[in-house]
Image (cartoon, grey):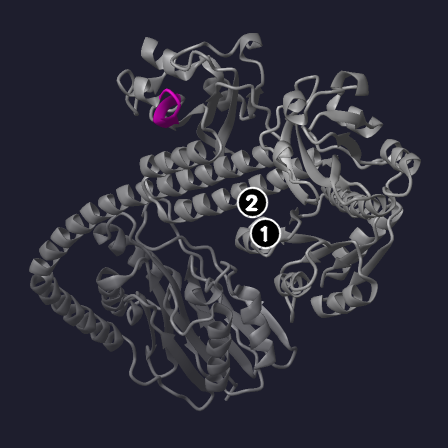
Amino acid sequence: MGWEEILTDAETPEKASPDMVKPNILVVDDEPLICSTISKYLALEGYTVVSAADATEGLMIYKQSKPSIIFTDIRMPGMSGLELLGEIRKDDKETEIVVMTGHGDMDSAIKALKLRASDFILKPIDFEVILLTIERAAERIALREKVKQYTADLETLIAQIKTSKNYLEAVFQNSPNAMITCDLKGRIRTWNARAEEITGYSASEVAGKTMEQLLRLDNTLLEMNTQSEGQKTLDSSVSQILTKDRQLRFINRNVSHITGEDGKSIGIVESFIDLTEQIKSERLLEKRYMQVQTINDISKMVSSENDLTSLSNYVLNTLYKTFFESSLLSLFFEEKPLNTLVLKAFDGKGKEALVNKIKPGKKYPADKGIPWRVFRTGKALIVDNVPASTDFFRGTLSDAASVFAFPIRSKKRIYGVLNIENTERIKLDDSDRFMLETISEFMGISAERIHLLDKITQQNRLLEKQADDLRSALRKVKSQNKTIESQNKRLIQDLRKAGEFQKSLLPEKLPQYKNVHFAASYLPSSQLGGDIYDIFDIDEELIGIILADASGHGVAAAMLSAMFKMTLQKYAVEILDPAQVMAKLNSDFCQVLQMGEFFTAFYAILERKTGQFIYSNAAHPRPLLYNYASGEITELDTEGFLLGVMEENISYEQQKITLSDNSRLVIYTDGVNEAADKKGKMYGDDRVRVRLLERAAEKPEAYLNALQADLKKHTGSDIFEDDVTVIVMDFKLP
């Protein structure tokens, strides 16, 4: 369906003959795989092939063997293919030279054609294209050989014509070229079989007529009635003729006068050969040159133009003026909402009438005509015969005879359609299709790039607005900086005081006895913690040992630690039963602690002389007792709930043991066994036991240093999430 009315309403080259002698071929390419593959393929096709690894070697082989056809890559190290072409063309205008280049190197292909390359093919190599190229080259070589043979035959004929009329007739009738004789007025007397084959006229049909009357020549080679006696003229010209079946063909005419023994002109002999296929080939090459140049020009425009409308107008105008003078060209692109095609630009025949009816930007109704079919399927559509098509509807270009449309795509997305309506029944060859597909692909790439640029522009505007909002917010933040800095200083001072206060709750120096040695380490966490420990004399023989851990962190945990120490001091001297002390502490804490606040604790009383050890545990990690004599470790545990959580039905168990001579007791908070590495794996009680066994022979201080180093290695940090507190007691009987 013709888009303009919808918007208003709402041949293969002739093959070489089988008996044609196959030319020898030289392949020049610095890529061994490509060179070898092409050579082997052509050899299998019956051609004699030699190869060269670079242009220098190729030039040397050319000078030695003079191949009929040369295939050469353009880009090679050292001498390039273009330089090789230039060297050969200095003295040799006939050798067929075909250059090979990549799709993205059109500039080099154009330079090669300007240096009179016979043809070019694009990489990656298509073997069918190679064979077709060789056949075209072989036809041109054969044609040149015919011309040379004709010249030789003509010279022989002229030399012998004076001595043998019969020989002349024999040459005429058996010549591979069209041969005729005329009287001095140009009227045809003899007409050989080849002339009949080319023109379609028999000898009886042409007798007595002139070439101009018979074939409608577009030029006259000799003025027959003005030739003076004794004049000898030899000339050559390319003419168009119209054959008997009304086909237009091109011939190369050679004419000379025949003189008698007295030197006077007695008639005219003319020979001509059919150049139609050669001229078609030359015009095809010229067309391909123009196609490559057009692709190159449009690619440069695509890379620099950011306005899709301007680019569309340029592309259509270029195609119209260069190739499609009898066509109406249009470009449609999808716009929001999606699935809507919009006419972006049009140019060509019928444009003037269309301008008054349709403006660019007009929406193209969905599901109508050829453009929509191509857009939906993503496949090109070639309509050689419009009357037979159900998709086309006649519009402004009422005499459209053929239509072809190509999808404009980039990657998997289709952006639009290139639509061309022709007043002639045009048939696209491979080079036409390649050009239009390439240009459509360029347009797709450009549409995608422009779409991304628009998106980036919109995002930049959004980012600019966000930046303005951020700058406004920063101004507000800056206006509050002084207040925040003041509050931070005050908070830091408060935390520093709280930390100093917490440290003041810990003993500055541990008491030491003849048979009992104490050591302790305290590593505060990254936040203010709640661990507290103490070792104190109850009387001359009894020693109190306490290690507790308040829930949470920060100032609140530090205050809980202070409260624990003051409350413990109230009961520790009066009550010599650790379980009762725990019960008293729990009762008092239940009255004052808030929800979520609690303590874990281990409290013990040691009688120095006897080694009697009484202890009670309130949900605290179990201390480890190591016996040097047996080498065994015992966990000290009693039943006991958290302190300060609940009072009803809560009791605490008490255990009494006698320490053996030479024992070591290790008491620690959960900051030790629950210290985790980066993967969340905890240090664990087993590691504490292993380190105790490994370091049992060392002094308590050395053991503590080793345990701290192992904790830092495990966590990968010098700062811990919770306070790390450890008490070590070495006991010997007096």
Q: In this view, does 115 lie to the left or right of 500?
A: right
Q: Label 1 is placed on what type of residue?
A: Leu
Q: What stretch is highlighted in magenta?
A: 340-350
Give the number of the disc on residue 113.
Answer: 1
Q: Where does label 2 land, which residue?
A: 289
| Residue 518 or residue 133, whichever sits in front | 133
Q: How crowded is mark 2: few (under 14 residues within 10 Å), some or many (20 or more)?
A: many
* Distance of label 1 from label 2 (alpha carbons): 7 Å
Q: In this view, does 225 lie to the left or right of 94?
A: left
Q: Are marks 1 and 2 in contact (CB under 8 Å)?
A: yes
Residue 430 seen from this side: no
Q: Is the magenta stretch mostly helix, strand or loop?
A: strand
| Residue 416 or residue 162, whichever sits in front | 162
Q: Name the secondary structure under disc 2.
A: helix
Q: What residue is at 64 percent from the left and 53 percent from the top?
A: 117
| Residue 118 or residue 572, whichever sits in front | 118
Of the numbered discs 1 and 2, the one sitting upstream in the chain is 1
Q: Label 2 is placed on what type of residue?
A: Tyr
Q: What residue is at 49 percent from the left and 86 percent from the top?
A: 702
| Residue 344 or residue 633, whichever sits in front | 344
In magenta stretch: residue 345: yes
Position of residue 5 measured from the top left corner of the image (x, y, whole percent): 37, 11
Position of residue 139 measured from the top left corner of the image (x, y, whole percent): 76, 41
